[in-house]
């Protein structure tokens, strides 16, 4: 069963997830615009207009929280549907060449990874599309701000691609070590149920191996993300310094600096998302390969 079939069986929760995601991501772009306008109005001593805009901004913020709650409901409805679809597949499986540890982890972990990835994918796609809105705004404000931002974005995207294959390899190693640890847990459980003494050295050794591989995987992912965010953060402050210069020569309004700062925060968030997507996608590929080892599927699981 491929992802297209899963989506067809999940149309209603998927539609709700798309609608709520569009609203909350759109509001995240709109609210800073109102705050920037408030600053400009106060600077120009238009206080009555400022009060009205503050009230509008408050209402939009409360509206954002409402849609965020609805988005969480939609997320869990979609996740639960996907999880049940895949669980149905593995509960009717031919387990030739599948160990108990691997089968347990497929149900407990791999299906969760795939369901989480698909459940988050809608928001992730919209967050990536936000780049286009931000780039367009920067181009409108100042060409050099646009040029620096888009050049930086391309460079950071290449860094993400560079780390990708290594992340996938480390994740596969982590999964294999978890399977082996789980097998040892089951063996010890069987011995303990028979009220016999057991040697825990093998379990401890496999646990240490798993913990080491798990740490290596997560440290690599986080190192990649933190390197990217640090470079973007430095660039943001350089852009703000340049923006202050533009204000000093009358080429930019003060409120626009606030908006540029806020939109750079969105860029930081979205690059963190891209790094997470990269790691999640590598994890999903490993999980799908493990699911495909179950021979009773009519078709291979694809994404």
Image (cartoon, rainbow, N blue to C red):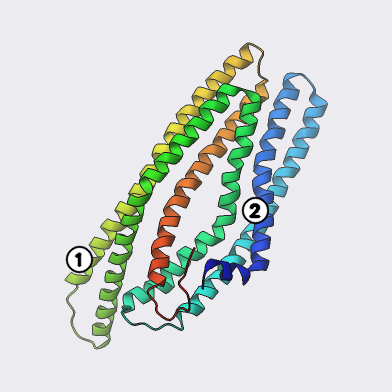
* Residue positioned most to the top: 249
Q: Residue at x 28, y 59 (%)?
A: 211
Is residue 229 in view from this perspective? no
Eye-nearest disc, 1 or 2: 2
Closer to us: 143 or 134: 143
Disc 1 secondary structure class: helix
Residue sticking out furthest to the front = 299
Q: Count the marks: how many? A: 2
Mark 1 surroundings: few (<14), some (14-19) or many (≥20) residues within 10 A: few
Q: Which residue is mark 2?
A: 21
**Coordinates of residue 239 in the picture (x, y in percent):** 53, 24
Whether label 1 touches label 2, CB < 8 Å = no
Q: Position of residue 99 (x, y in %)?
A: 31, 78
- Sequence-first tag of 1 and 2: 2
Q: Give the structural element (helix, strand or loop) at label 2.
A: helix
Quick check: 229 above or below 38?
below
> Relative to the observer, which residue lies in front, 162 or 194?
162
Q: Which residue: 69% across, 53% down?
A: 67
Image x and y of residue 288, in percent: 42, 66
Judged left or right of residue 253, residue 279 is: left
- Which of 131 and 181 lies nearest the eye of the viewer? 131
Can you tell which quarter of the image residue 230 is in?
A: top left
Residue 255 is marked as: none
Assess disc 2: are there few (<14), some (14-19) or many (≥20) residues with their C-alpha within 10 Å of its C-alpha: many
Which residue is tagged 1? 205
- Tell me which corner region of the image, top left, top right, bottom left or bottom right, holds residue 264: top right
Residue 300 in sight here: yes
Q: Kindly identify the residue that appears in the image at 48 percent across and 46 percent down.
A: 274
Spatial CA distance of label 1 from label 2 is 44 Å
Q: Is residue 47 left or right of residue 228?
A: right
Residue 2: give x, y in percent of width and height.
52, 69
When asked about the image quadrant of residue 72, the answer is bottom right
């Amino acid at each position: 069963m491929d992802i297209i079939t899963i989506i067809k069986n999940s149309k209603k929760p998927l539609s709700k997830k798309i609608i709520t995601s569009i609203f909350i991501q759109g509001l995240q772009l709109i609210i800073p615009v109102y705050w920037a306008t408030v600053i400009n109005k106060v600077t120009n001593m238009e206080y009555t207009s400022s009060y009205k805009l503050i009230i509008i901004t408050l209402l939009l913020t409360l509206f954002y929280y409402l849609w965020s709650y609805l988005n969480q409901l939609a997320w869990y409805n979609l996740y639960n549907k996907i999880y049940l679809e895949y669980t149905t597949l593995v509960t009717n499986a031919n387990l030739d060449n599948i160990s108990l540890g691997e089968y347990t982890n497929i149900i407990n972990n791999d299906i969760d990874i795939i369901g989480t990835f698909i459940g988050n994918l809608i928001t992730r796609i919209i967050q990536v599309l936000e780049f286009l809105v931000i780039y367009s705004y920067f181009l409108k404000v100042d060409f050099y701000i646009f040029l620096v931002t888009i050049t930086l974005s391309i460079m950071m995207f290449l860094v993400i691609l560079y780390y990708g294959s290594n992340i996938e390899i480390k994740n596969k190693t982590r999964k294999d070590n978890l399977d082996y640890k789980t097998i040892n847990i089951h063996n010890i459980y069987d011995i303990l149920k028979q009220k016999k003494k057991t040697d825990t050295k093998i379990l401890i050794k496999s646990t240490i191996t798993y913990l080491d591989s798990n740490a290596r995987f997560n440290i690599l992912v986080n190192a990649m993300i933190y390197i990217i965010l640090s470079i973007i953060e430095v660039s943001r402050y350089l852009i703000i310094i340049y923006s202050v210069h533009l204000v000093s020569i009358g080429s930019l309004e003060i409120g626009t600096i606030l908006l540029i700062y806020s939109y750079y925060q969105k860029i930081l968030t979205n690059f963190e998302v891209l790094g997470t997507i990269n790691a999640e996608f590598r994890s999903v590929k490993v999980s799908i390969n493990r699911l495909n080892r179950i021979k009773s599927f009519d078709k291979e699981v694809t994404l």
